[in-house]
Structures are given as structure tokens and as C-alpha cells.
Amino acid sequence: MFRSAVVRSLRTSLPRAVRTPAPFQIRSSAAVRPSQFAARLAFPAVRCYSAPAGLAKDEVEGRIVNLLKNFDKVNDASAITGSSHFSNDLGLDSLDTVEVVMAIEEEFSIEIPDKEADAIHSVNQAVEYILSQPDAH
Amino acid sequence: MLRHKVIALYKELLHLGREYPAGPSFFRARLHAAFAANAHLRDEAEIHRAIQKAEYVKREIEAL
């Protein structure tokens, strides 16, 4: 009932609606379009979805420090800073370091190859590695 | 070379340990102790033997 009423009213109103503004529409669109294009091209911060997210250094460092704070083998949570060395400052052995690196892999959803993972011994090095990875999140 | 192999084994075992019945933290502590107990090994043959043992444990856990 309702649908047929809508269809009927559309059918009666449509031809009128289209016929009258048609010449005006063509004229106006030709006048408006160039400025619209110019506005869109001038807009500076267009970012495509495939572009890298671009993590900030502070954010990466904060997340790694947080992750270390939750790691129960760190004796002194107040000692964790952006420049802490895993074994010298935090008292972790090489196996703990492997675990920390695994946790970092999970945190940033990347996979660190064994060779590079073996070279990460401090928060600084971890931050640098994450920043150098375009697909870290 | 052997070092990388041991670290890879450690990672695999850690992953496997997540579903360990007594809990991952229990498993992690024991695994860490087991690996640390062999950290002093320097003789290649002995390290190979330890790796064999770890592989065996890995298969046991997989079968669990």
C-alpha cells in the first residue's frame, strides 16, 4: 500500500522535477566544477589507506617501556627508561631478552628475523628497529 | 650458528608452552631454568646433545 503510493507519487512528480531544472543544472555544473577540482587538488593532507601509519618515536618508546614494566622478570620497574640496556640495567639474561623481543614482535605485529632479533639488546635499539620497519603498528 | 638454533628452539617451545595445562608462566619458568642450566656448555657435541633433548621435549609437548 505504502510502497505503491510512494511509487505513484514519484512517477507523477519526477518528470516535472527533472524537466524544469535541467537547463539550469547543466549551466551551473559547468560553472562549479573547475573550482571544485581546484579545491580538491589544493587540499594538502590526502593520505591513502595503503600509506604507512608512521609511528612516532615517543609512542614506540612508551609502548616498549610499558611492555617491559609488565614483564615480571624486571627487578626494578623504575629503572626502565628509553636508554635502558636489557642485561646491564634491567638484569635480564639472554633468554629473557629473547622473550622481550618476542613480546615486541607481538606488540607491533611484525616479525623480526633471528639475526636482527639477536642484535637488539636495549630499549634504544628496539625503538630504532621498530621505526625502521614500515609495517610496524 | 648453534646459538641461533638454540634461540629458535627456545622460541618454538615458548609458543608451544602457551597451551600447557599448568599455565604458560609455569612452563616459561621451567623452560628458562632448563635452558639456563645448559648455558655453560661450550663443547659442540654436548650442545648438539642438549639440542636433541630439546627436540625430544618439543615432540613430547606437541603430542600432549
Image (tube, coloured by chain):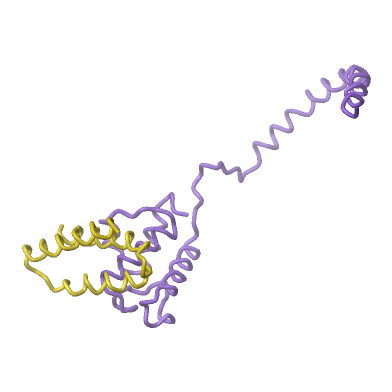
Q: Which chain is yellow?
A: B
Taking the spot 21% from the left edge, 73% from the top edge, the residue there is B36
Q: Nearer the viewer, residue B6 or A62?
A: B6
Residue B37, percent across and down? 18, 75
Q: Nearer the viewer, residue A126 or A110?
A: A110
Q: Nearer the viewer, residue A24 or A77?
A: A77
Residue A22, percent across and down? 86, 19
Residue A137, percent across and down? 47, 54
Taking the spot 51% from the left edge, 51% from the top edge, the residue there is A53
| Left or right, B47 with reference to A77 | left
| Looking at the image, residue A2 lies above or below residue A26 | below
| Looking at the image, residue A9 lies above or below residue B49 | above
The quadrant holding residue A12 is top right
Taking the spot 46% from the left edge, 63% from the top edge, the residue there is A60
Taking the spot 44% from the left edge, 60% from the top edge, the residue there is A107
Q: Which chain is purple?
A: A
The quadrant holding residue A1 is top right
> How many marks can you see?
0
Residue A34, percent across and down? 73, 28
Outermost residue toward the front in this view:
B64
| Left or right, A7 with reference to A119 | right
